[in-house]
Amino acid sequence: MPRPELGVPARVDALVVGAGCVGCSIAYNLAERGMRNVLVVDRGEVGAGSTGRCAGGVRQQFGTEVNIRIGMRSVEILRDFEARVGRSADFRQIGYLFLASDDDALAELRRNLAQQREAGLADAHEVGVDEIARLVPALRTDDLLGGTFCQTDGIAGPNEVTQGYAHAARERGARIMEGVDVTALAPHAGGWRVSTSRGEIRAGLVVCAAGAWSAALGELAGTNVPVEPYRRHIFVTKPFPGVSRTTPMTVDFRTSFYFHPEGEGALLGMSDPAEPPSFRTDVDWDFLEHLVEHGVQRVPSLADAEIMTGWAGLYEVTPDHQAIVGEAADVPGFWLCTGFSGHGFMQAPAVGELLADAITGKAPAFDISPLRPGRFAAGEQTEERAVI
């Protein structure tokens, strides 16, 4: 028999909208800091949105200090995830390898590497063509100039991490409700009156962790959230020569084609600059031909690979390709943790801590002001160029 639909609680201290990895991390960290009356709602199921459709990459190799430090903290948390939350993150530090096939790409990777060292990431280093060939023998390398590699980057399980946070949040008193749609937000008595498909909630504060759907939630709250949804494809192959379980996540910096081991095969992805913003998550199988064309140029043995499955998810893209983290400048009590531009899963462990610290009045471990919501209105954004 189907479970009866339960009404939402009448009052909560914090309402988190969105039960992806980011939302569940926030709930866990708020509860861990002593906030017991935390509710997470999602119109779907836990981790079934963009989190459940991502590639699972975890990296520290970014081009801005704040993203590098977020990446470093997320890696630190994932290394110790089971001890923290009682569940495995399926985190495998197979490394991230970025490839440069032209002078501009190599110069960009070197600039990023200098920023990474300044931020304290000692594990990343420049690699020559010989080392690239040793790391991934299946690659075509005759047109490469070099690249960068960080062994402590890797891949983790989106479902494992999200469900781990959800389980640990519940153990600490937080509640998570699926199938709840937020339909209206109105300031009320120093907090919020929130209308949902399951009843009304009085919330002390609201956290937007709604990913690609954040602009609509911001509109309900009376603030502009500059996030646009973009479809991104992923395909998974059956086993083929040249890719093993220890092959690093490999990214062609010029084309954005990437792959990493997935089971006994490989997971493939690539951005499409011609794709307009939309909420489409159907698979465009014609795009697979475009991806494979570029992929075979970099990994010739991919020509013999059989595609097993494919899916599409949504990137939540901001104008500077950096997340929006903090309290809305024009709407007190409305907090944002969104706009990760393809990096939400990998940054969720750290940003959950950082936002929970800010909400509970604790100084964050490092400066996250470059991600503040008001930066766009002030014209003070800095573009993150190390995006895929």
Image (cartoon, helix red, strand yellow):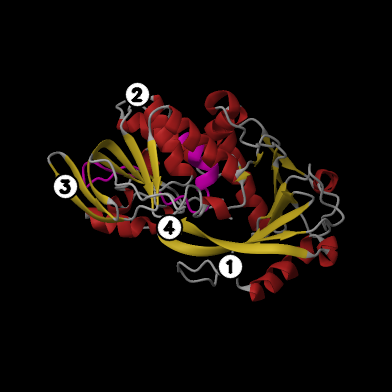
Q: Element type at marker 4? A: helix
Q: Which quadrant does the C terminus fall into?
A: bottom right
In the image, residue 204 lies at what x, y percent?
A: 22, 37
Q: Is residue 177 above or below residue 355?
A: below
Mark 3 vs mark 1: which is more N-terminal? 3
Part of the protein shown in magenta: 325-350
Instruction: Kindly state the secondary structure of the residue where label 3 is placed.
Output: strand
Corner quadrant of residue 228: bottom left
Which residue position is annotated with label 4?
212
* Residue 387 showing in the rendered view: no
Q: Residue at x 61, y 51 (%)?
A: 108
Q: CA distance from mark 2 to mark 1?
A: 44 Å
**Three-letter amino acid code of the residue under disc 4:** Ala
SS type, badge 2: loop
Direction from residue 120 to residue 261 in the image, left or right: right
Quarter of image, res 222: bottom left
Amino acid type of disc 2?
Gly
Disc assigned to residue 272:
1
